[in-house]
Protein backbone atom coordinates (compact mmCIF):
# COMPACT_ATOMS: atom_id res chain seq x y z
CA UNK A 1 0.00 0.00 0.00
CA UNK A 2 1.02 3.55 -0.58
CA UNK A 3 2.13 5.31 2.58
CA UNK A 4 1.34 9.01 2.52
CA UNK A 5 4.02 9.83 5.10
CA UNK A 6 6.81 8.23 3.08
CA UNK A 7 5.64 9.96 -0.11
CA UNK A 8 5.52 13.34 1.63
CA UNK A 9 8.95 12.80 3.16
CA UNK A 10 10.41 12.01 -0.26
CA UNK A 11 8.74 15.06 -1.81
CA UNK A 12 10.00 17.24 1.08
CA UNK A 13 13.55 15.95 0.52
CA UNK A 14 13.37 16.91 -3.15
CA UNK A 15 12.09 20.39 -2.30
CA UNK A 16 14.95 20.88 0.14
CA UNK A 17 17.51 19.76 -2.45
CA UNK A 18 16.11 22.15 -5.03
CA UNK A 19 16.19 25.04 -2.55
CA UNK A 20 19.77 24.24 -1.54
CA UNK A 21 20.85 24.18 -5.18
CA UNK A 22 20.97 27.94 -5.58
CA UNK A 23 21.65 27.80 -9.31
CA UNK A 24 18.68 25.54 -10.03
CA UNK A 25 16.36 27.44 -7.68
CA UNK A 26 17.34 30.80 -9.18
CA UNK A 27 16.83 29.47 -12.67
CA UNK A 28 13.38 28.07 -11.88
CA UNK A 29 12.15 31.26 -10.24
CA UNK A 30 14.02 34.05 -11.98
CA UNK A 31 14.50 32.49 -15.42
CA UNK A 32 10.82 32.05 -16.18
CA UNK A 33 9.95 35.43 -14.62
CA UNK A 34 12.62 37.21 -16.65
CA UNK A 35 11.41 35.56 -19.84
CA UNK A 36 7.82 36.66 -19.14
CA UNK A 37 8.94 40.25 -18.49
CA UNK A 38 11.02 40.39 -21.67
CA UNK A 39 8.28 38.97 -23.88
CA UNK A 40 5.61 41.13 -22.24
CA UNK A 41 7.65 44.29 -22.79
CA UNK A 42 8.25 43.36 -26.41
CA UNK A 43 4.76 42.15 -27.31
CA UNK A 44 2.71 44.72 -25.42
CA UNK A 45 3.83 47.50 -27.73
CA UNK A 46 1.97 48.21 -30.95
CA UNK A 47 3.80 48.08 -34.26
CA UNK A 48 5.02 51.64 -34.74
CA UNK A 49 7.67 53.80 -36.39
CA UNK A 50 8.58 51.38 -39.16
CA UNK A 51 11.04 53.11 -41.52
CA UNK A 52 9.53 54.52 -44.72
CA UNK A 53 11.14 56.01 -47.80
CA UNK A 54 9.31 58.45 -50.08
CA UNK A 55 10.11 59.20 -53.70
CA UNK A 56 8.24 62.40 -54.54
CA UNK A 57 8.57 62.95 -58.27
CA UNK A 58 5.96 65.72 -58.33
CA UNK A 59 7.16 68.01 -55.51
CA UNK A 60 3.87 69.89 -55.47
CA UNK A 61 1.80 71.22 -52.59
CA UNK A 62 -0.55 68.22 -52.85
CA UNK A 63 2.28 65.68 -52.89
CA UNK A 64 3.89 67.33 -49.84
CA UNK A 65 0.54 67.19 -48.06
CA UNK A 66 0.32 63.47 -48.78
CA UNK A 67 3.87 62.97 -47.47
CA UNK A 68 2.94 64.82 -44.26
CA UNK A 69 -0.16 62.66 -43.84
CA UNK A 70 1.89 59.49 -44.21
CA UNK A 71 4.52 60.70 -41.76
CA UNK A 72 1.85 61.54 -39.16
CA UNK A 73 0.77 57.91 -38.77
CA UNK A 74 2.06 56.03 -35.73
CA UNK A 75 2.91 52.96 -37.82
CA UNK A 76 5.19 54.78 -40.28
CA UNK A 77 8.28 56.89 -39.79
CA UNK A 78 9.62 58.91 -42.72
CA UNK A 79 13.31 58.05 -42.52
CA UNK A 80 14.52 58.39 -46.11
CA UNK A 81 14.05 60.91 -48.92
CA UNK A 82 14.50 58.75 -52.00
CA UNK A 83 16.20 60.04 -55.11
CA UNK A 84 15.39 57.17 -57.47
CA UNK A 85 13.71 53.79 -57.80
CA UNK A 86 17.14 52.17 -57.66
CA UNK A 87 17.73 53.66 -54.23
CA UNK A 88 14.33 52.39 -53.09
CA UNK A 89 15.21 48.87 -54.26
CA UNK A 90 18.61 49.00 -52.53
CA UNK A 91 17.12 50.13 -49.22
CA UNK A 92 14.41 47.47 -49.35
CA UNK A 93 17.06 44.85 -50.12
CA UNK A 94 19.27 45.92 -47.21
CA UNK A 95 16.42 46.41 -44.75
CA UNK A 96 17.01 50.15 -44.48
CA UNK A 97 13.30 50.78 -45.05
CA UNK A 98 10.18 48.64 -44.70
CA UNK A 99 8.07 50.48 -47.28
CA UNK A 100 8.66 52.84 -50.21
CA UNK A 101 5.96 55.23 -51.44
CA UNK A 102 6.35 56.58 -54.98
CA UNK A 103 4.35 59.70 -55.86
CA UNK A 104 4.35 60.12 -59.66
CA UNK A 105 5.18 63.22 -61.61
CA UNK A 106 2.02 65.12 -62.53
CA UNK A 107 0.28 64.04 -59.31
CA UNK A 108 -1.22 67.49 -58.60
CA UNK A 109 -2.19 68.23 -62.20
CA UNK A 110 -3.90 64.85 -62.56
CA UNK A 111 -5.92 65.50 -59.42
CA UNK A 112 -6.93 68.95 -60.68
CA UNK A 113 -7.97 67.52 -64.06
CA UNK A 114 -10.05 64.75 -62.47
CA UNK A 115 -7.70 61.99 -63.54
CA UNK A 116 -6.64 59.21 -61.15
CA UNK A 117 -2.90 59.45 -60.47
CA UNK A 118 -1.21 56.19 -59.51
CA UNK A 119 0.57 56.08 -56.16
CA UNK A 120 2.83 53.05 -55.90
CA UNK A 121 3.63 51.25 -52.65
CA UNK A 122 6.55 48.83 -52.37
CA UNK A 123 6.72 46.85 -49.13
CA UNK A 124 9.20 44.38 -47.65
CA UNK A 125 7.32 41.09 -47.18
CA UNK A 126 10.06 39.18 -45.37
CA UNK A 127 8.55 40.34 -42.08
CA UNK A 128 4.92 39.27 -42.45
CA UNK A 129 3.53 41.35 -39.60
CA UNK A 130 5.51 44.46 -40.43
CA UNK A 131 4.75 44.15 -44.16
CA UNK A 132 1.00 43.79 -43.71
CA UNK A 133 0.94 46.61 -41.15
CA UNK A 134 2.74 49.17 -43.31
CA UNK A 135 0.71 48.32 -46.41
CA UNK A 136 -2.57 48.66 -44.53
CA UNK A 137 -1.45 51.91 -42.88
CA UNK A 138 -0.25 53.48 -46.16
CA UNK A 139 -3.35 52.39 -48.06
CA UNK A 140 -5.57 53.83 -45.33
CA UNK A 141 -3.77 57.18 -45.28
CA UNK A 142 -3.77 57.54 -49.07
CA UNK A 143 -7.45 56.60 -49.35
CA UNK A 144 -8.39 59.06 -46.58
CA UNK A 145 -6.26 61.77 -48.20
CA UNK A 146 -8.08 61.33 -51.52
CA UNK A 147 -11.51 61.34 -49.90
CA UNK A 148 -10.63 64.51 -47.98
CA UNK A 149 -9.71 66.22 -51.29
CA UNK A 150 -13.04 65.26 -52.82
CA UNK A 151 -14.94 66.44 -49.76
CA UNK A 152 -13.09 69.76 -49.79
CA UNK A 153 -13.83 70.39 -53.47
CA UNK A 154 -17.38 69.06 -53.82
CA UNK A 155 -18.76 69.16 -50.29
CA UNK A 156 -19.80 65.50 -50.30
CA UNK A 157 -18.08 62.16 -49.92
CA UNK A 158 -17.00 60.12 -52.91
CA UNK A 159 -14.48 57.39 -53.73
CA UNK A 160 -10.87 58.52 -53.49
CA UNK A 161 -9.57 59.97 -56.80
CA UNK A 162 -6.33 58.01 -56.44
CA UNK A 163 -5.27 54.65 -57.82
CA UNK A 164 -3.16 52.63 -55.38
CA UNK A 165 -0.65 50.12 -56.67
CA UNK A 166 0.61 48.15 -53.68
CA UNK A 167 3.32 45.59 -54.32
CA UNK A 168 4.83 43.36 -51.65
CA UNK A 169 8.35 42.33 -52.51
CA UNK A 170 10.08 39.05 -51.63
CA UNK A 171 6.85 37.51 -50.25
CA UNK A 172 3.99 38.56 -52.50
CA UNK A 173 1.29 36.62 -50.60
CA UNK A 174 2.65 37.57 -47.17
CA UNK A 175 2.92 33.86 -46.42
CA UNK A 176 3.80 33.09 -42.83
CA UNK A 177 6.05 30.19 -43.77
CA UNK A 178 8.42 32.52 -45.63
CA UNK A 179 8.93 34.41 -42.39
CA UNK A 180 8.97 31.49 -39.94
CA UNK A 181 10.82 28.62 -41.61
CA UNK A 182 14.13 30.43 -42.39
CA UNK A 183 14.11 31.74 -38.82
CA UNK A 184 13.50 28.24 -37.44
CA UNK A 185 16.45 27.04 -39.51
CA UNK A 186 18.65 29.68 -37.90
CA UNK A 187 17.39 28.92 -34.39
CA UNK A 188 18.07 25.19 -34.75
CA UNK A 189 21.63 25.91 -35.91
CA UNK A 190 21.99 28.18 -32.88
CA UNK A 191 20.72 25.57 -30.39
CA UNK A 192 22.82 22.72 -31.85
CA UNK A 193 25.96 24.89 -31.72
CA UNK A 194 25.31 25.92 -28.14
CA UNK A 195 24.49 22.39 -26.92
CA UNK A 196 27.43 20.65 -28.61
CA UNK A 197 29.99 23.28 -27.57
CA UNK A 198 28.66 23.54 -24.02
CA UNK A 199 28.58 19.80 -23.37
CA UNK A 200 32.21 19.05 -24.29
CA UNK A 201 34.31 20.08 -21.29
CA UNK A 202 31.44 19.64 -18.79
CA UNK A 203 31.01 16.01 -19.92
CA UNK A 204 34.74 15.34 -19.45
CA UNK A 205 34.62 16.88 -15.97
CA UNK A 206 31.53 14.88 -14.97
CA UNK A 207 33.03 11.60 -16.22
CA UNK A 208 36.32 12.33 -14.46
CA UNK A 209 38.33 12.24 -17.69
CA UNK A 210 39.22 15.94 -17.78
CA UNK A 211 42.08 15.39 -15.33
CA UNK A 212 43.39 12.60 -17.55
CA UNK A 213 43.38 14.93 -20.54
CA UNK A 214 45.18 17.58 -18.52
CA UNK A 215 48.18 15.31 -17.88
CA UNK A 216 48.57 14.36 -21.55
CA UNK A 217 51.00 16.29 -23.82
CA UNK A 218 48.00 18.32 -25.07
CA UNK A 219 48.51 22.03 -24.57
CA UNK A 220 45.57 24.09 -23.27
CA UNK A 221 45.01 25.78 -26.64
CA UNK A 222 45.04 22.40 -28.40
CA UNK A 223 42.47 21.06 -25.96
CA UNK A 224 40.17 24.04 -26.52
CA UNK A 225 40.52 23.87 -30.32
CA UNK A 226 39.96 20.10 -30.27
CA UNK A 227 36.74 20.58 -28.32
CA UNK A 228 35.68 23.38 -30.66
CA UNK A 229 36.02 21.44 -33.93
CA UNK A 230 33.01 19.08 -33.37
CA UNK A 231 30.97 22.09 -32.24
CA UNK A 232 31.61 23.69 -35.63
CA UNK A 233 31.31 20.65 -37.90
CA UNK A 234 28.13 19.13 -36.43
CA UNK A 235 25.97 22.30 -36.59
CA UNK A 236 27.24 23.08 -40.10
CA UNK A 237 26.33 19.60 -41.36
CA UNK A 238 22.92 19.98 -39.70
CA UNK A 239 22.53 23.33 -41.42
CA UNK A 240 23.22 21.83 -44.86
CA UNK A 241 20.68 19.05 -44.32
CA UNK A 242 18.03 21.44 -43.01
CA UNK A 243 18.65 23.90 -45.83
CA UNK A 244 18.03 21.12 -48.37
CA UNK A 245 14.76 20.26 -46.63
CA UNK A 246 13.75 23.93 -46.38
CA UNK A 247 14.25 24.51 -50.09
CA UNK A 248 13.29 21.10 -51.47
CA UNK A 249 10.39 20.10 -49.24
CA UNK A 250 8.91 23.38 -47.99
CA UNK A 251 9.72 25.30 -51.21
CA UNK A 252 11.27 28.31 -49.52
CA UNK A 253 13.28 30.09 -52.23
CA UNK A 254 17.04 30.49 -52.09
CA UNK A 255 17.38 33.65 -54.17
CA UNK A 256 20.89 34.57 -53.06
CA UNK A 257 24.29 32.93 -53.11
CA UNK A 258 24.51 29.51 -51.48
CA UNK A 259 28.24 30.04 -50.91
CA UNK A 260 27.58 33.37 -49.14
CA UNK A 261 24.96 31.77 -46.89
CA UNK A 262 27.33 28.90 -46.04
CA UNK A 263 30.21 31.26 -45.29
CA UNK A 264 28.12 33.52 -43.04
CA UNK A 265 26.64 30.47 -41.30
CA UNK A 266 30.16 29.30 -40.45
CA UNK A 267 30.93 32.78 -39.14
CA UNK A 268 27.82 32.68 -36.95
CA UNK A 269 28.65 29.22 -35.61
CA UNK A 270 32.16 30.35 -34.68
CA UNK A 271 30.75 33.48 -33.00
CA UNK A 272 28.23 31.42 -31.01
CA UNK A 273 30.85 28.82 -30.15
CA UNK A 274 32.42 31.03 -27.49
CA UNK A 275 29.23 31.18 -25.43
CA UNK A 276 29.00 27.40 -25.36
CA UNK A 277 32.64 26.92 -24.34
CA UNK A 278 32.30 29.43 -21.50
CA UNK A 279 29.17 27.64 -20.26
CA UNK A 280 31.03 24.34 -20.46
CA UNK A 281 33.94 25.71 -18.44
CA UNK A 282 31.88 27.21 -15.59
CA UNK A 283 29.45 24.28 -15.28
CA UNK A 284 30.19 21.60 -12.68
CA UNK A 285 28.16 18.98 -14.55
CA UNK A 286 26.00 18.51 -17.63
CA UNK A 287 22.81 19.34 -15.73
CA UNK A 288 24.11 22.83 -15.02
CA UNK A 289 25.23 23.08 -18.63
CA UNK A 290 21.74 22.42 -19.95
CA UNK A 291 20.25 24.92 -17.49
CA UNK A 292 22.65 27.63 -18.65
CA UNK A 293 21.97 26.79 -22.30
CA UNK A 294 18.23 26.95 -21.73
CA UNK A 295 18.49 30.28 -19.92
CA UNK A 296 20.69 31.79 -22.64
CA UNK A 297 18.35 30.38 -25.28
CA UNK A 298 15.40 32.14 -23.64
CA UNK A 299 17.22 35.47 -23.73
CA UNK A 300 18.42 35.09 -27.30
CA UNK A 301 14.96 33.96 -28.44
CA UNK A 302 13.51 37.19 -27.07
CA UNK A 303 16.22 39.35 -28.65
CA UNK A 304 16.42 37.54 -31.99
CA UNK A 305 13.39 39.07 -33.65
CA UNK A 306 11.83 35.63 -34.16
CA UNK A 307 8.89 36.07 -31.80
CA UNK A 308 8.67 39.86 -31.89
CA UNK A 309 10.14 42.29 -34.41
CA UNK A 310 13.18 44.05 -32.96
CA UNK A 311 11.79 47.38 -34.18
CA UNK A 312 8.80 46.85 -31.87
CA UNK A 313 10.91 46.44 -28.72
CA UNK A 314 11.52 49.18 -26.13
CA UNK A 315 14.72 51.16 -26.83
CA UNK A 316 16.71 49.45 -24.05
CA UNK A 317 15.90 45.95 -25.33
CA UNK A 318 16.48 47.05 -28.90
CA UNK A 319 19.98 48.21 -27.94
CA UNK A 320 20.69 45.01 -26.00
CA UNK A 321 19.65 42.89 -28.98
CA UNK A 322 22.65 44.20 -30.92
CA UNK A 323 24.87 42.01 -28.73
CA UNK A 324 22.99 38.83 -29.65
CA UNK A 325 24.58 37.04 -32.65
CA UNK A 326 21.34 35.21 -33.48
CA UNK A 327 19.59 38.52 -34.21
CA UNK A 328 22.12 39.36 -36.93
CA UNK A 329 22.11 35.80 -38.27
CA UNK A 330 18.32 35.71 -38.74
CA UNK A 331 18.56 38.89 -40.80
CA UNK A 332 21.27 37.20 -42.89
CA UNK A 333 19.26 33.99 -43.44
CA UNK A 334 16.09 35.83 -44.46
CA UNK A 335 18.06 38.33 -46.53
CA UNK A 336 19.98 35.75 -48.58
CA UNK A 337 17.09 33.31 -48.99
CA UNK A 338 14.18 35.68 -49.61
CA UNK A 339 15.78 38.87 -50.91
CA UNK A 340 18.83 37.53 -52.72
CA UNK A 341 20.91 39.90 -50.59
CA UNK A 342 24.61 40.25 -51.31
CA UNK A 343 27.52 40.72 -48.92
CA UNK A 344 27.27 44.47 -49.49
CA UNK A 345 23.63 44.44 -48.38
CA UNK A 346 24.52 42.39 -45.29
CA UNK A 347 27.74 44.17 -44.40
CA UNK A 348 26.42 45.63 -41.08
CA UNK A 349 25.31 42.18 -39.87
CA UNK A 350 28.53 40.55 -41.07
CA UNK A 351 30.70 43.09 -39.27
CA UNK A 352 28.59 42.66 -36.14
CA UNK A 353 29.19 38.90 -36.19
CA UNK A 354 32.92 39.41 -36.75
CA UNK A 355 33.14 41.86 -33.84
CA UNK A 356 31.02 39.74 -31.49
CA UNK A 357 32.84 36.55 -32.47
CA UNK A 358 36.28 38.09 -31.95
CA UNK A 359 35.33 39.51 -28.58
CA UNK A 360 33.60 36.37 -27.32
CA UNK A 361 36.36 34.01 -28.46
CA UNK A 362 39.08 36.20 -26.94
CA UNK A 363 37.33 36.14 -23.56
CA UNK A 364 36.64 32.42 -23.97
CA UNK A 365 40.27 31.45 -24.53
CA UNK A 366 41.47 33.61 -21.64
CA UNK A 367 38.90 32.29 -19.18
CA UNK A 368 39.29 28.67 -20.27
CA UNK A 369 43.08 28.75 -20.00
CA UNK A 370 42.83 30.12 -16.47
CA UNK A 371 40.27 27.51 -15.39
CA UNK A 372 42.18 24.65 -16.97
CA UNK A 373 45.54 25.64 -15.47
Image: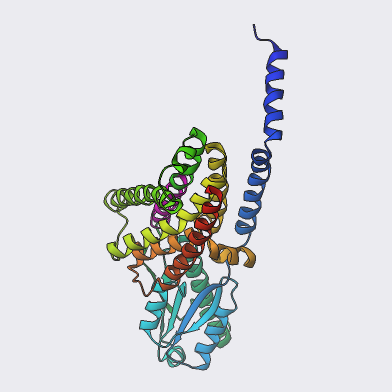
Relative to the observer, which residue lies in front, 314 or 294?
294
Pick out the residue farthest to the left.
248
Residue located at (54% from left, 63% from top)? 323
Residue 10 in which image quadrant: top right
Is residue 173 in view? Answer: no
Q: Is residue 124 left or right of residue 322?
A: left
Is residue 372 in view? Answer: yes
The quadrant in which the N terminus is found is top right
Dominant secondary structure, magenta: helix
Residue 258 screen position, x and y as percent:
28, 62
Relative to the observer, which residue lies in front, 79 or 146?
79
Residue located at (48% from left, 59% from top)? 361
Task: Inspect the magenta stretch and tell me whether residue 124 lies in it.
Answer: no
| Span of residues in magenta | 176-195
Relative to the observer, which residue lies in front, 138 or 155?
138
Residue 88 screen position, x and y as percent:
40, 80
Residue 138 lies, with reference to residue 327, above or below; the image says below
Amino acid sequence: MLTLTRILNLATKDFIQIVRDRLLASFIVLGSTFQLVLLALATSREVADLPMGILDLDKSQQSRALVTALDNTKELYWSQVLASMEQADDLLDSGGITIAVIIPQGFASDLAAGRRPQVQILADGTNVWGGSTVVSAAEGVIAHFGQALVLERTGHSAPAPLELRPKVRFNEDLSGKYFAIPAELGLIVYMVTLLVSAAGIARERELGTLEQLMVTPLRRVELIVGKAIPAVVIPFVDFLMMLAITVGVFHIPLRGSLFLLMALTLLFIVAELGFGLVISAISANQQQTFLFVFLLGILDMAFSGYLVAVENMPPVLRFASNFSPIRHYLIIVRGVMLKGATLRDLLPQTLALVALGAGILTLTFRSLRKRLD
